[in-house]
Image (tube, grey):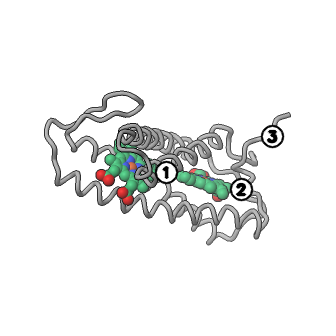
Amino acid sequence: MRDKYSGLQIGIHWLVFLLVIIAYCAMEFRGYFPRSARPVINMVHVSCGISILVLMVARLLIRLKRPAPPIVPKPKPMMTGMAHLGHLAIYLLFIALPVIGLVMMYNRGNPWFAFGLTMPHAAESNFEIVDMMKEYHILLANIGYWLIGLHALAALAHHYVWKDNTLLRMMPRKRG
Ligand code: HEM
Ligand code: HEM
């Protein structure tokens, strides 16, 4: 039985990690940039967000086909259950969050760009939907901070406190 996630799964995990950091930073620090840079900052945010959506769906499909490699020593069943619940929450949140962002941008009814390309938008603005999506987007983005924080803490606790191979299973392979 494999003792690690596949190279593809590990690559996607850490690429998504990087994209999530950039997506959050673009919004949290947008106030520090001159107004003229805002369109670029927004495009960075939405391009990272859309990439995260695609990668999260892809990794979920891969994960449904490939069982996770075993953790050694084996944690208690309750811990495994909580980890599965936590991972499910991360999948759902980082799929719902960008979808809500897309619905928000579409309904603004103005031209907008991702990856340097013009994206589709509604013929007329629908502010009711935009305002509702904006509220959900902000709420989920805030919950995302807590989920990632807990997830990272759990991974570090596995490594340093319980001293099992959880984190090593998600680390890039050594060459040679
Ligand atoms: C996982 C991916 C994403 C994360 C982590 C994320 C996170 C955030 C955060 C933290 C904010 C700032 C909220 C605030 O003002 O307190 C924000 C705002 C925003 N996001 Fe995202 N987002 C993601 C994906 C997307 C996508 C795919 C789109 C659109 C295609 C999008 C469109 C927007 C817009 C338009 C705003 C500004 C809302 C406003 O202030 O009017 N986001 N996002
Ligand atoms: C944006 C940040 C992150 C996201 C969205 C994320 C997402 C995920 C998801 C969805 C899984 C479940 C994989 C599966 O289906 O089996 C996972 C596993 C894992 N992640 Fe993260 N992760 C993030 C950050 C981190 C960080 C910072 C660490 C380390 C400090 C980490 C360590 C791990 C480990 C060790 C696993 C394997 C857990 C297991 O199989 O029980 N992740 N991650």
Which structural element holds mark 1?
A: helix
Q: In the visual, does 134 lie left or right of 17?
A: left
Q: Which residue is mark 1?
A: 25
Task: Please name the amino acid that badge 3 sits on.
Answer: Lys
Mark 2 vs ligand 2: CB below 8 Å: yes
The CA span between labels 2 and 3 is 14 Å
Can you see residue 92? no
The image quarter containing residue 142 is bottom left
x, y percent for residue 53: 44, 43
x, y percent for residue 83: 59, 63
Q: Quadrant of ligand 2?
A: bottom right
Callout in the foreground (2, 1):
1
Q: Is residue 23 above or below residue 110?
A: below
The CA span between labels 2 and 1 is 25 Å
The CA span between labels 1 and 3 is 30 Å
x, y percent for residue 109: 19, 39
Q: Earlier in the sequence, mark 2 or mark 3?
A: 2
Q: Which residue is mark 2?
A: 167
Q: What residue is rendered at 40% in x and 52% in y?
A: 31
Q: Are marks 1 and 3 in contact (CB under 8 Å)?
A: no
The image quarter containing residue 66 is top right
Q: Residues within 10 Å of mark 1 (few under 14, many from 20)?
A: few
Which structural element holds mark 2?
A: loop
Q: Earlier in the sequence, mark 2 or mark 1?
A: 1
x, y percent for residue 170: 69, 49
Q: What residue is rendered at 62% in x and 45% in y?
A: 14
Which structural element holds mark 3?
A: loop
Residue 174's mark?
A: 3
Can you see residue 84? yes
Q: Residues within 10 Å of mark 2 (few under 14, many from 20)?
A: some
